[in-house]
Image (cartoon, grey):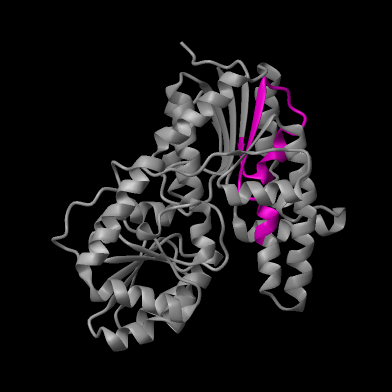
């Protein structure tokens, strides 16, 4: 099976949401015996090692460097051409040349694209089956930003939402299959893009990696937030929590601690470490040891939908999670005793305080959450959905 696989970032290491997803589906295709040609972007110096690793696994890899600061200027070309700014941001001559070369050599059995912005490279390319893994509609993300912005932001982000939705519509109607991450996303997709019924393929979790090593280091009044800390929804969520909720929790629990664990913390996030009990770690080798230091995990995201990896990972580690409705809705219908959903600062403070005050009850919630994740959200379940879709299109495993 010949596969052309496109994604925004180098899909290794699996240390942030999109890399986790793309790596797991890429390695599943490789495990099926696929001959994969991979197109993506390198953004950091460390990506050179990742690309070298991927070259040992894939038939070919094209990963030109993408400087996001410079690309923000490049994307303004979209204003001149009436297109979404996202498209010129991710448009690169070297990557298009590589894709065109691959297509000229062999017609792929499968074209797999993660994130709609990468579909521009293969809009008219032939393949037995073309899968567009939207995960979420990016246009709706910009619509959410517009709602929370001033006059100029409302115009700019609103324009981006409208233009990108037009492109997403065209992509969905030119690909054989569209994947979204949750029933909520499916409903939104069908409202915005008429005539296409997407498949729901949630994110999974590596239940072997995210497995607690016991309670020896667990502190009953420690909360944890994980995520890439230059990502706007993460910044917004954790800053909101520290500003609106943390002082009340510290007043009630004098030894309360908050671990903010994730790479590339912005100055606004770094400044949170000046608050009593707050630790900002920056990049760490792996997050499970930090989960094992905490009693409660937080997902205070206000700009979110879809399945949040941070929620699944914390639940797999046996931690009770206090989540906003936005961060929780992608999980679908889960038992109330496996997840605490809190809307607003008062409800969030109350939920965290209840779990801090009763460590045994908190631990029981976490254990039920871990059992749920292991049953419903392990990656093997998602691979089975993909295998069924490929089989429907006549694509079996390679020998």
Near-viewer residue (239 or 42): 239
In the shown orientation, is residue 249 left or right of residue 391?
Answer: left
Answer with left or right where residue 117 lies relative to residue 204: right
User: How many numbered discs sit on the rendered protein?
Assistant: 0
- What residue is at 61 percent from the left and 57 percent from the top? 68
Q: Which residue reaches farthest left?
A: 216
Classify residue 156 as left or right of residue 311.
right
Q: Position of residue 310 (x, y in %)?
A: 41, 56
Q: Nearer the viewer, residue 344 or 76?
A: 344
From this view, report whether residue 54 is shown above or below residue 138: above
Check the image and name the residue furthest to the right.
Answer: 81
- Inspect the magenta stretch and tell me whether residue 157 lies in it: no
User: Residue 123, percent across and down?
Assistant: 75, 34
Q: Position of residue 154 (x, y in %)?
A: 75, 71
Q: In the rendered image, which quarter contains the N terminus?
A: top right
Q: Quadrant of residue 233?
A: bottom right
Q: Is residue 345 left or right of residue 318?
A: right
Residue occupying the point 75% across, 52% down:
164
* Vertical position of residue 294 compared to residue 288: above or below: below
Question: Is 113 located above or below residue 343 in the figure?
Answer: above
Q: Which image quadrant is residue 181 in? A: top right
Write down the region rendered in magenta: 113-141
Q: Is residue 318 visible?
A: no
Residue 298 coordinates in the image, percent (x, y)? 39, 66
Q: Per the image, is 126 magenta?
A: yes
Which residue is the extreme one toward the bottom? 251
Can the viewer see residue 115?
Answer: yes
Measuring 29% from the left and 44% from the top, which residue is drawn there? 209
């Amino acid at each position: 099976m010949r596969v052309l696989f496109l994604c925004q970032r180098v899909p290794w290491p699996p240390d942030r949401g999109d890399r986790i997803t793309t790596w797991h589906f890429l390695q599943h295709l490789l495990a099926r015996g696929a001959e994969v040609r991979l197109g993506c972007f390198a953004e950091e110096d460390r990506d050179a090692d990742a690309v070298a690793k991927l070259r040992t696994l894939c038939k070919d890899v094209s990963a030109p460097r993408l400087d996001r600061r410079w690309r923000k200027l490049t994307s303004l070309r979209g204003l001149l051409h009436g297109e979404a700014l996202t498209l010129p941001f991710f448009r690169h001559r070297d990557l298009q040349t590589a894709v065109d070369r691959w297509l000229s050599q062999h017609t792929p059995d499968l074209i797999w694209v993660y994130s709609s912005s990468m579909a521009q490279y293969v809009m008219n390319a032939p393949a037995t089956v073309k899968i567009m893994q939207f995960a979420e509609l990016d246009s709706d993300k910009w619509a959410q930003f517009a709602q929370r912005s001033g006059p100029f932001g409302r115009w700019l982000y609103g324009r981006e939402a409208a233009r990108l939705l037009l492109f997403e519509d065209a992509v969905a109607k030119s690909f054989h299959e569209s994947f979204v991450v949750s029933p909520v996303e499916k409903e939104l997709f069908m409202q915005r893009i008429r005539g296409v019924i997407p498949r729901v393929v949630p994110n999974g979790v590596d239940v072997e990696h995210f497995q607690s090593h016991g309670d020896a280091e667990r502190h009953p009044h420690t909360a944890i937030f994980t995520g890439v800390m230059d990502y706007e929804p993460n910044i917004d969520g954790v800053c909101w929590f520290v500003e609106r909720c943390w002082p009340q929790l510290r007043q009630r629990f004098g030894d309360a601690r908050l671990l903010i664990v994730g790479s590339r913390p912005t100055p606004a996030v770094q400044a949170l470490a000046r608050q009593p009990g707050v630790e900002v770690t920056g990049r760490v080798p792996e997050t499970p040891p930090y989960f094992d230091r905490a009693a409660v995990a937080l997902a205070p995201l206000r700009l979110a939908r879809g399945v949040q990896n941070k929620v699944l990972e914390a639940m797999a580690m046996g931690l009770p999670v206090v989540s906003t409705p936005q961060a929780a809705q992608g999980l679908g219908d889960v038992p109330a005793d496996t997840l605490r959903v809190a809307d607003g600062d008062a409800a969030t403070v109350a939920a965290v305080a209840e779990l801090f005050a009763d460590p045994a009850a908190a631990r029981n919630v976490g254990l039920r959450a871990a059992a749920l994740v292991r049953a419903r959200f392990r990656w093997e379940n998602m691979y089975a959905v993909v295998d069924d879709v490929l089989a429907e299109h006549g694509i079996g495993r390679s020998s």
